[in-house]
Image (tube, rainbow, N blue to C red):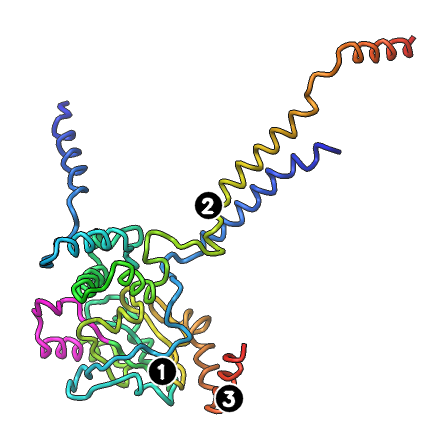
Amino acid sequence: MKKMPLVIIPLVLFALLVVFLFQGLFSDPRALDSQVVGKPLPHFELPDLMQPQTIYTPEVFKGDVTIVNVWGVWCVTCAVELPYLTQLSQQGVKFVGLYFDQDLDPDFGTKTLDRVQTEVTQMLGRYGNPYSFNIFDVYRDTSLDLGVTGAPEHFVIDKQGIVRMHHIGDINERVWASKVGPLYDQLQAQTFSSLKASQAGGEGE
Amino acid sequence: MNKQPILILLVMLLSSWAVPAVEDNFAFDDPAKRAAYLRLTEELRCPMCQNQNIADSDAMIAHDMRRKVYTLLQQGKSEQQVIDYMKARYGDFVHYRPPVTLATFWLWALPILFAAAALIYVVVRRKPAMPEDMAAKLARAEKLLEQDK
């Protein structure tokens, strides 16, 4: 009778360890806790990639659910997801590109804007263009503010310009069906008044 | 077979690890700032190539973070301010020294708890093994033998 618990303790500890390590098999080490989710976009004033005289601020996202796609022509996975994103955009999903260039070192600029634009036009011509427009993150400061670690990454922005999801990696059919799509539909269904109500409730907590 | 070429190759491979992966040219007029820069880039962790600090990583994000650390230091920000700046964007993950929170508390507490539990176990275990009075034991044995007869 007295020996029972002593035998069980290591077994229980072992079982707990197994559960803990087994979970680790499925955790994605690149999935960090995003610091921007639930907050409005950090302030920026950035030019349009194609018409640099147009300047965008976070105001541009108000009124629509938008998926901001961080990408670049040098990124292979971005090229892979472009056809699917284009298909989604044809179904009415609004994508905005946050473009940044790898070779364009802000301190030792080696690549002209012309060259970047040509490369982008070529790539979008080849794989499809899902973007309403592209914001050019010249100094990659906004990417840093958003906690971007690479490309592709996606931010789901609600109608009030608040970040609702930070997805690291590409969007494909599986990711859309299980992760991004449901949130997008839910945000899309929210009217402006219900949004305000839910916000007021959130603040009351 | 002569093993010397393999040995030389091995030594060359091993020594190449020690070479820093990246070389930046950031000019500091203040040696204290330079020291702070070197300390910070050692302490800050690259979010892309995890388990490398940003001094060591050649990922673009590490490049950008080094440039940011340099800019912030040149603006006169303190080391803590730079760390907070990065944490505000990449979370606690970005710093190699985790803060004590309810979740990380166990990193320190578990070994201590384990040692304490083991100690208690050993102490409790020892008590029944205390040597009993031999005479009493013999008397009891005698009694049992008596009964068996």
Residue A58 position, x and y percent, is: 30, 83
Kindly report which numbered mark, 1 or 2, lies closer to the viewer in this rendering: 2
The residue at which mark 3 appears reads as A194
The disc labelled 1 sits on which kind of residue? Thr
**What chain is tagged by disc 2?**
B
Kindly report which numbered mark, 2 or 3, lies closer to the viewer in this rendering: 2
Q: Residue at x 91, y 12 (%)?
A: B147
Q: Quadrant of residue A132?
A: bottom left
The disc labelled 3 sits on which kind of residue? Ser
Task: Say whether residue A105 is magenta.
Answer: yes
Residue B75 position, x and y percent, is: 18, 67
The residue at which mark 2 appears reads as B108
Q: Which residues are magenta?
A: A99-122
Residue A99 seen: yes
Q: In the drawing, does residue A46 fall left or right of residue B105?
A: left
Instruction: State how far apart marks 1 and 3 are (Cα).
Output: 18 Å
Query: Is B20 drawn above or below residue A42 in the view shown?
Result: above
Q: Quadrant of residue A176?
A: bottom left
Q: Nearer the viewer, residue B96 or A72?
A: B96
- Which of the image's four quarters has the N terminus of chain B? top left
Q: Nearer the viewer, residue A99 or B19?
A: B19
The residue at which mark 1 appears reads as A66
Kindly report which numbered mark, 1 or 3, lies closer to the viewer in this rendering: 3
Q: Residue at x 35, y 75 (%)?
A: A155
Residue A41 position, x and y percent, is: 33, 78
Classify mark 3: helix, strand or loop: helix
Instruction: State how far apart marks 2 and 3 are (Cα).
Output: 45 Å
Query: Which sits earlier in the primary sequence, circle 1 or circle 3?
Result: 1
Q: Quadrant of residue A2?
A: top right
Residue A119 position, x and y percent, is: 14, 75
**What chain is tagged by disc 3?**
A
